[in-house]
Amino acid sequence: MQVLTAVVALGAMAAAHVVGPAPDPADRPGVPADRPLSAAVDGFAGRAGDFDGDRRDDVAAFTRGEGGDVYVARSTGARFDGIGDLWSDTFAFWSQAPLAGDFDGDGRSDVAAFARGGKPTVTVALSTGRSFGRSRVWTTSFAPNVEIPAVGDVNGDGRDDIVAFRRGSDAVVSVALSTGRSFRPSTPWHGHFATGPSVPAVGDVNGDGRDDVVAFTRGESAAVAVALSTGRTFGRAAWWSGWFAEDRALPGLGDVNGDGRADAVAFARDPEASPEQGAEVTVALSTGRTFRRMPAPWLGSWATGGAVPGIGDFNGDGRDDVAAFTRGGRADIYVALSTGRGFRQTPARWHEYFAAATEIPQPGILW
């Protein structure tokens, strides 16, 4: 009851106002004329993408801005290959939110860009296995203003759909189902979920083949709520954990023990901390009805300083692993593989220069 009271109080907080730059004319063909949101508005998190369909998750980097380049480095199971191949040079401009998902159900992950703001289009570029095809608008109205976009197969048809979390005091959760060629009109699937500044996530936490929604309150309450998908709506929210992802931890979902259910993962990363300070990775395994927090951290120090953490099955063994993107001038990628009982950091870097400067890596948890 105490946790519930805390979450209701968070939900009463006023929603943020969108203040973005004035529209600018495009400098080259194919570049959207206006910049929908400032780059500092809130955050988002994306799942890993298997862009070539070999059952190993790969990594992507989005330059955004006026450039709109997308680079991919494919996993060999022991590293990410090559120097990063240019898969598209006209995708995810300005401050659009880029996410990966298999939207046409062909076994290869595609990419979607959410414009948000006052012109909330969603653009998709399908994967050919070697590049992303021509980008096309799949819906002209989804995740407006500062709603948080996410991706998941919520109806279990093998095609990833899109989900938007309004948060704040309203906290409606909307879904647009994929037809394989476009997204159907947005419909509300839950009337009050992920209130206030809760961090939302999407994943199949009960292993029924349909992705569910999860909300991490963080802070001093550090509770975790879940609403299971029925295939047509998200059911009544229930508390699955009373203490997880506390303070400023970055939460995410991944099947780290390979049992078919998405587990909760929290990175105790503090962007203001020095690289020498510890940044534990904790795990709460899903039982299908609750999250059971493991007594010991799965990794003692990971994604320190300003590194961006991510989750994906990079070696294709059926268990999700963790990655850390240093970005900036170093732009290294480190991977710690899951043993099913912990994460084991591999001795060598998985890539020596990828997602440099402020490029957006996926998978990446950016809050």
Image: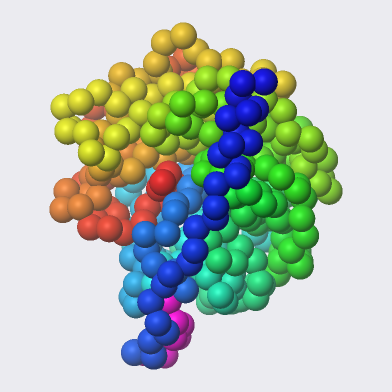
What's the colour scheme?
A: rainbow
Inspect this view and state whether residue 209 appears: no
Which is nearer the eye, 45 or 248? 248
Q: Is residue 47 left or right of residue 141?
A: left
Query: Is 18 located above or below residue 108 in the figure?
Result: below
Which is nearer the eye, 100 or 114? 114
Residue range highlighted in magenta: 28-35
* Residue 271 position within the rendered picture, expressed as x and y whole percent measured from the top left: 27, 40
Residue pictured at 33% horizontal, 65% vertical: 63
- Answer with the quarter of the image where residue 4 lies: top right
Q: Main secondary structure of the magenta part?
A: loop
Query: Is 316 located above or below residue 95 in the figure?
Result: above
Residue pictured at 21% horizontal, 34% vertical: 273
* Residue 74 position within the rendered picture, expressed as x and y whole percent measured from the top left: 40, 50
Query: Is 154 located above or below residue 218 in the figure?
Result: below
Q: Is residue 60 left or right of residue 184?
A: left
* Residue 327 position within the rendered picture, expressed as x and y whole percent measured from the top left: 25, 50
Q: Is residue 235 left or right of residue 226?
A: right
Residue pictured at 32% horizontal, 49% vertical: 81
Inspect this view and state whether residue 340 appears: yes
Residue pictured at 43% horizontal, 69% vertical: 19
* Residue 251 position within the rendered picture, expressed as x and y whole percent measured from the top left: 47, 34
Whether the magenta-drawn stretch holds residue 144 is answered as no
Whether the magenta-drawn stretch holds residue 32 is answered as yes
Which is nearer the eye, 86 or 323? 323
Query: Is 116 located above or below residue 157 in the figure?
Result: below
- Answer with the quarter of the image where residue 77 lies: top left
